[in-house]
Image (spheres, rainbow, N blue to C red):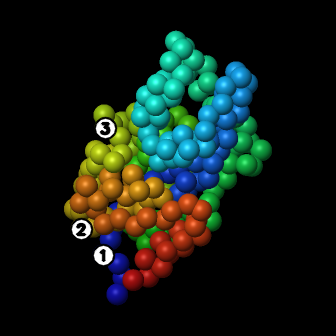
Amino acid sequence: MKTNKELFLFDFDGLLVNTEEIYAQGWIHALKQEGKTISKNQLSKWCGQSSSATRQDFEQLFPEPGFYEKIYQKREEFIYCSLENGNLHLLPYAKEALSAIQKAHKKSRLVTGSKRKRVLDILRHFQIERFFDQIICDDDIHSSKPDPEGYLLGLKGFMRSEAIAFEDSTTGLLAAKRAGIEALQIPSPDYATLECVLEYLKK
């Protein structure tokens, strides 16, 4: 029997694209240019965290006025260079899963804590924006994951029982569950398990 799920909700960073590792490298690169360092432990805490929450943490570590904006810009340049040189790439089965959902006449939506401009630029670079009928970013919400606000927005037009969410982080998984949505965690670096979306469509 085919799955009764009609709505497939996806996180972005670390699930569809390898941005989590690129983001970390970007922080290190940008801070090094200014003679600063940051611990791997701190960077790991930012994985799965929204842009707004990360900024709050950053400004506690480096409270100099205007320093966040300066480093953020250098980091963005690093991210876009990584996109162009191929270091930032789609993860295994990402495009195949989204295409299969579309062919099954079901909906895919994106729920991410990243900023809209970068998300759209990356989606368009890999030509996968067309698979999503709604894209919810940090710009669209007041409270980030693990708050369920983003997932509740993503449910519009569907019942909770019709939806399933896919996340790589525990924070995102908790957000989906708090929204009352069935959720599967696909933790890094076990990316290939996005293949489970294809298997889920066969149920």
Q: Amino acid at mark 1?
A: Asn
Estimate how packed mark 3 is, as few (under 14), some (14 to 19) or many (20 or more) residues with alpha carbons within 10 Å. Answer: some
Is label 2 in a helix, a strand or a loop? helix
Q: CA distance from mark 1 to mark 3?
A: 30 Å
Q: In the image, which disc is placed on residue 4?
A: 1
Which mark is first along the chain, 2 or 1? 1
Question: In this rendering, does residue 108 appear at all?
Answer: no
Q: Amino acid at mark 3?
A: Ser
Question: Is the C-beta separation of discs 1 and 2 under 8 Å?
Answer: yes
- Asked where in the image residue 191 lies, by quadrant, the reply is bottom right
User: Residue 89: image x %, image y %?
Assistant: 67, 53
Query: Residue, x 28% and y 49% (percent of image)?
Result: 148
Estimate how packed mark 1 is, as few (under 14), some (14 to 19) or many (20 or more) residues with alpha carbons within 10 Å. Answer: few
Is label 1 in a helix, a strand or a loop? loop
Which mark is first along the chain, 3 or 2? 3
The residue wearing badge 2 is 161
* Quadrant of the frame with the C terminus: bottom left
Q: In the picture shown, does residue 27 fall above or below 194?
A: above
Query: Residue, x 49% and y 44% (percent of image)?
Result: 45
- Considering depth in this image, is 38 or 166 the residue closer to the camera? 38
Q: CA distance from mark 1 to mark 2?
A: 9 Å
Which mark is first along the chain, 3 or 1? 1
